[in-house]
Amino acid sequence: MTTKEEWIQKDLKYVWHPDTQMKQYEDSDFKPVLIERGEGIYLYDIDGNKYIDGVSSWWVNTLGHSNEKLNKVLTQQAEKIEHVLLADFTHIPAIELAERLIKLSGEPFSKVFYSDDGSTAVEVALKMAYQYWYQKGKPEKKYFVSMTESYHGDTLGSVSVGGIDIYKKIFNPLVFETLKVSAPYCYRCPQNKEQCKCSIDCIAEVESLFKHRHNEIAAMIVEPLVQGAAGMRMYPPQYLTKVRELCDRYDILLIDDEVAMAFGRTGKYFAFEYANIKPDIFCVAKGITAGYIPLAATITTDKIYNAFYDDFSTLKTFYHGHSFTGNPIACAVAVENLKIMEQENIIENLKPKITKLKQCLEKFRDLAHVGDIRQTGMIGALELVKNKETKEPYQFEDRIGHNVFKEALKNGALLRPIGNVIYFMPPYIIKNEEIEKLTKIAYNAIKIVTEKN
Ligand SMILES: *Cc1c(COP(=O)(O)O)cnc(C)c1O
């Protein structure tokens, strides 16, 4: 029998891990954790150790691991039809899912375009927006506006609208030019305003840019309420409301990248509901299959759709399609996920858990190096700083976040950080006492690691 050590050796030999400096893996005492199975909020490694999945396995798992109902639907669908192309052919799971998505998102949404993951859903949105203006006779509207420190995926188009250096800098010669506005990062406000006491003055930058260049701007793309990969940076919904107003005033499309936020993460089905707005195009992926299978959708309105709808000879077709577009197994699991969410009142039942998370986060105020505590729905984040007064950040080399992660892992919690931001993004089925346990492990880990430094 192959031992655990041998599997790890083979892993290091054959697998190139994402976002990972492989040399560090090989050199350090920290080796990849070999997970064998999952159940509910827990992951079990090959030695039987269990870990609370505090980050929902990169923000995708919502109903827990190895969910009985989802498992059943998955196998049943595989036995019927595992995959079929979606051009000239169709199948019930794709139709049912599209109908559900349109009903959930409400007017004026009318059409669902499938793809495979968050990045491709964003690519689709960008191409749709550009081709829309092209077919409206305005090809000069070709620029996209996005926020500093934004993240929209790892493919070149989505990297173009991204703003995080580590993902982008090297590829700058390859990506297309975009226009940037300062992100509304309240803890380190670009306007030096006191948190929660502003009147969204930072919107002026968007307004000025739109005013001067609206003739060249196709769309603005935003991460609604939370800039996830930037370190769970949160901003008030009023900002989004104002962006929508400006987009209307200057005839610019609004693309809402809900990839990380949709399906209850913020406490509502879609984050745009908090701003009382509707984007022109929005993207969903993570969470759509409750974390089971890659699947994504770009959802839009008749206004956009009709610009593509014409005789074949006019060449207005949207030529975009992935091999696995609308995969039946993925769609069937997604339909079941949405059924469970409805039948089991998942979103309503999040309310007391969100309150619990809030209470637990408050306790971190007495830690000397927790600079900012933020929360939106089922996301809690702690920004660790060297100095709370001056907000002086820890340096990358300090690896504070990573050390907290290792300490928490020893105590049974998976809390993979983003730089020096420790965050909680557990599956929705987590219980109140488990939220307490998870945050307590984090508390102790932060205390131990920051006191050492
Ligand atoms: C994760 C993420 C993406 C990319 O999704 P993938 O499935 O990883 O390609 C895009 N946008 C946002 C906001 C994300 O959080």
Image (spheres, grey):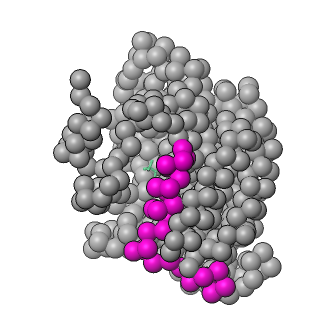
Give the residue at the far left of this rendering. Answer: 13
Quarter of the figure with residue 162:
bottom left
Quarter of the figure with residue 375:
bottom right
Residue 89 vertical position relative to residue 125 in the rendered view, above or below: above
Image coordinates of residue 76 in percent, x first then y, are 48, 13
Image coordinates of residue 54 in percent, x first then y, are 57, 47
Res. 224 in view: no
Image coordinates of residue 116 in percent, x first then y, are 42, 41
Image coordinates of residue 255 in percent, x first then y, are 56, 59
Q: Which residues are magenta?
A: 387-413
User: Residue at 43% of width from left, 12% of height from top?
Assistant: 80
User: Residue at 21% of width from left, 40% of height from top?
Assistant: 10
**Which corner quadrant holds the N terminus?**
top left
Res. 74 in view: yes
- Does the magenta-highlighted stretch encompass residue 91? no
User: Residue at 45% of width from left, 24% of height from top?
Assistant: 329
Viewer-side residue, 108 vs 156: 156
User: Residue at 43% of width from left, 56% of height from top?
Assistant: 153
Horizontal arrangement in the rendering, residue 425 relative to residue 18 (left or right): right
Quarter of the figure with residue 102:
top right
Viewer-side residue, 210 vs 160: 160
Q: How many numbered marks does the figure carry?
A: 0
Horizontal arrangement in the rendering, residue 249 relative to residue 48 (left or right): right
- Does the magenta-highlighted stretch encompass residue 392? yes
